[in-house]
Image (cartoon, coloured by chain):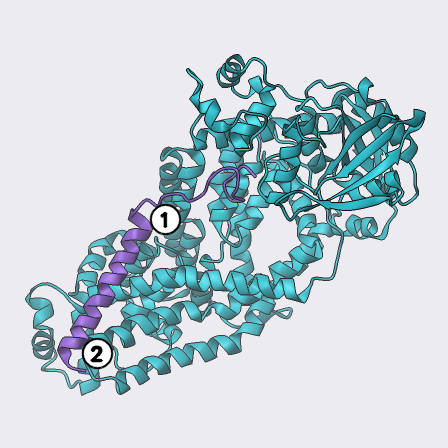
Chain colours: A purple, B cyan
Amino acid sequence: MNPFIQNVLAITALVFALGFIFTKYFVKKKSKKACGGDKDCGCH
Amino acid sequence: MSKQINVALIGNPNTGKTSVFNALTGLNQKVGNYPGITVEKKEGVCKLPRGVKAHIIDLPGTYSLNASSLDENVVIELLLNKNDKDFPDIAVVVSDVENLKRNLLLYTQIKDLEIPTVLVINMADRMDYKGISLDLEYLEKHLKTKIALVSTRKNQGIERLKSLIANYKDLSISHCIDLTEIDKDYFNNLQNTFPNQLIYKLWLVITQDVNFGKTDRNEIDAVANFKTKSKNDLKRLQQKETIKRYQFINDVLKNGQTIDVAHAKDLRMKIDRIITHQFWGYVIFFIILLTIFQAIYDWSSIPMDFIDTTFASLSEWTKNQLPPGTFTSLLAEGIIPGLGGIVIFIPQIAFLFLFISVLEESGYMSRVVFLMDRIMRRFGLSGKSIVPLISGTACAIPAIMATRNIENWKERLITILVTPFITCSARLPVYLIIISLVIPEGRFIGLGYQALTLMLLYLIGFGAAVSSAYILNRVLKIKSKAFFVVEMPNYKLPLLKNVAITVLEKTKSFVFGAGKIILALSIILWFLASFGPGDNFKNAEEITTKEYANQQLSSVELQQKIASHKLEHSFIGITGRAIEPAIRPLGYDWKIGIAIVSSFAAREVFVGTLATIYSVGSDEEDTIKNRMAGEVNPVLGGPLFTFASGISLLLFYAFAMQCMSTLAIVKRETYSWKWPILQLTIMTMFAYIVALIAFQLLK
């Protein structure tokens, strides 16, 4: 494996890691839950 | 032609509904299906006095009219549709004498639909064994109905039930609760817009999207000047409705039902009297806790050592087998040690959940809740708060969500605020690694010091939670307390399958939940530790060689000095040294500082972070524990992890709010950022002060 491929793989891993952390903590997820049919919605 | 009346038999699952059905119909039932739905219902005929025939429909068991499954929807659709040929003239709600509180929720909902309703209190033969006595006259008056006390096993009360069904026209149809008390404007507006409709039916249609007659939710929306609320607002109103119903039930049962434990005759009650005894109950609980913590240590030491050495070898193997380069270093020094920092704790986490699962399955945990209720009351909280607090030993997030069953808002708020003090499973890896470094392995009366320290930390967490609840109770002043009723399940031998599934699921969620974060952070931290700005990092080799030119260092020692210099001047080193002055009084160096900051994502990250930082630039094959034990205090010399700094770190993690996800859930549950910010500030300040005092006193 030449140094170029090593660097590309490492940078790809970094981008994925940063993307994961960013989406986990900074992107507000849309709730898929709706009242009336979901056990975790808080009203059942 | 004799008259026939429709009777709907409704109740929670396992209340003996089918037995009542069989007793009424003499097993003369036929089985039919609702069209298009696979849920089964039973129908039968019962002969009543004066030649009246009753068409009995045994509906699927349901806990409430807030349907969450298709079989529950069957019940609601029948009760809301007057045009259905099976629409009941009378509803017979079957309840179990041992679980009246829970069963009555459904009763109050059906009653509010203005359907004549009879309440059957089944399993009456168990009352004597359970020490339960009922004031039937009081219950009938306040539940606004007639009650049949039934024992299908002894064939008692069936004739009275038949007589009540036959005279259903005499039954009151008045409501149990007034919905307008929940939100006056909303429900008055709803009633004014649909003056000919029953308000509770409208409310069920709006919340359940169930059609009745010709009106559905969309039509309700379409009517001028009336807008249904947002889903969140509807949820809140539904929660308020449930709370209101339970308040009504609590008030009725307070005087209508007495449970005298002293008169209980059965074996279960005898065991309960010992296990929930006001002195021996706590002694037994304490012994069980001691046994659990000792076993966690004794049983997991061999698999933990195996995992630790395996990861150290894997890291070394990767370095030797793959060609040198950035990615190889990232794998060997970042990803593998980072993952090792979480996998190593699998045995201990699995054993902890094994014990918790056995206690839950056997029915003992409900007794613990009952025991704790006594303590909680002294600190101004009801036993309802103990359920979230006990759930908090696994994770604060579901625990905070579990506070939703606390009716009183202030009591719920206090429980939300103090729950993060409870030792969650994420703290466990931090505790275990620090304890193994600073607490000796000796034993006291057969109990290891390390196991005792771990148990002490759990008790400190619980102590901090109840003490802060006491203070908050004084500050926020709770006027009315929630009435606490705990259901004591029968004792049973835990099913191996259930225990295995729980252990597997919990361990999986621990590894994969935190594992993904740790993997990502390990990669980021490795980059931050392997690269740096300026000449100090770039020319590390030259600077270090010059600096130690006069000393006779071996090539290994020199490589270590270069790696250390590089780390100090890397991005992470610069950041760590910037925060070091703030944490040095606590006995920590900048590397621990970085681990504390990164573990704000999840506490478990602490060990993985240190494993990654200590691995960067290191050529030796070594375990996480050995690397941590080998760290030298840059100021005082000697080991970095001493008894003083270790205790300081343990106490910091015991009290600090080191969890971003918990803050987010507190915000969601309190509908404001005010409380999580306050919680974070106070807990962090308190943790800092306690850790500071501990280090300064012990160093």
Give the Cα distance between marks 2 and 1.
Answer: 35 Å
Q: Amino acid at mark 1?
A: Met
For label 2, the SS is helix
Q: Which label number is shown at residue B660?
A: 1
Where's residue B582, x and y in %? 26, 51
Side of B61 relative to B536 (left or right): right
What residue is pinned by disc 2?
B560
Occupied quadrant, residue B93: top right
Dot 2: few (<14), some (14–19), or many (≥20) neighbours within 10 Å?
Answer: some
Most foreground residue, B254 or B16: B16
Please state, as top left, top right, bottom left or bottom right, where the C terminus of chain A lies in the image. top right
Where A43 sits versus B517, above or below? above
Nearest to viewer (mark 2 / mark 1) = 1
The single residue placed furthest to the front in the displayed view is: B1
- Residue drawn at the location 52% of the way across and 41% of the way down: A37
* Parent chain of label 2: B
Where B318 sits versus B1, above or below? below
For label 1, the SS is helix
Dot 1: few (<14), some (14–19), or many (≥20) neighbours within 10 Å?
Answer: some
Most foreground residue, B4 or B626: B4
Occupied quadrant, residue B108: top right
Q: Amino acid at mark 2?
A: Gln
Most foreground residue, B657 or B582: B657
- Residue drawn at the location 47% of the way across and 78% of the way down: B305
- Residue drawn at the location 52% of the way across and 14% of the way down: B188
